[in-house]
Amino acid sequence: MSAKDHPLALFRFHLDFSPRFSDLGASGQVSSPRFFNYFEEARAAYLKRLSLLAEDTLPVSLLVARDTCRYRVPIQHHHLVQIHLRTADWGRRAFSFHYALWLPEEDLLAAQGHTRVQCLNPITQRACDLPEEFLRVMRLFEQGKLD
């Protein structure tokens, strides 16, 4: 497989973690609903990394409109897990987070996910445009023009 065809080729951000005991089901595998918690933690870390999570830089709320996960292999309690995240599909009022849950010690893709978020004005509780600076920073980061 060439580098450009690798499942992680498009991702510039990742978060490492080990599953917690409370994440496990009776089988000793991570319970499937927990994957969405992992996605949420990665979203927050990504926005914080880009300095977009502070109250003064995010005068809007991001509402999850759609959240999906495609499970490929089980995650066990002993696995080191990397959540790779990227943003894409930017629109005027919404954009997407894409995820790859990677098991680096096994060199395996455990799951893929997608979250579509919509911008919401917290005062009016109505959809609104994403701040231009917010979009600009994400695009620059994803293009490799911002570290």
Image: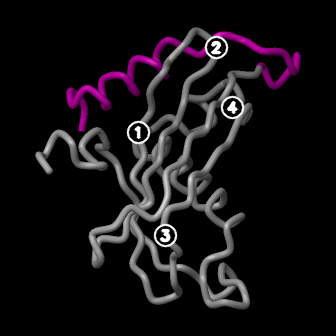
Residue sitting at 41 percent across and 46 percent down? 49
Closest to the observer: 138 or 112? Answer: 112
Q: Mark 1 points at which residue?
A: 86
Sort mark 3 into few (<14), some (14-19) or many (20+) by Cα contacts within 10 Å.
Answer: few
Counting labels gives 4
The Cα–Cα distance between marks 3 and 1, rounded to whole angstroms, is 21 Å
Sort mark 1 into few (<14), some (14-19) or many (20+) by Cα contacts within 10 Å.
Answer: many
Q: Name the residue under label 4.
A: 62
Circle 2: element type: loop
Residue sitting at 68 percent across and 31 percent down? 62
The Cα–Cα distance between marks 2 and 1, rounded to whole angstroms, is 18 Å
Q: Where is residue 89 in the image (x, y as percent from the top left)?
A: 48, 21
- Disc 1 marks a residue whose amino acid type is Arg
- Disc 3 marks a residue whose amino acid type is Val
Instruction: Look at the image and tell me in which quarter the C terminus lies.
Output: top left
| Residue 3 sits above or below residue 58 on the image | below
| Mark 1 vs 4, N-terminal side | 4
Closest to the observer: 32 or 17? Answer: 32
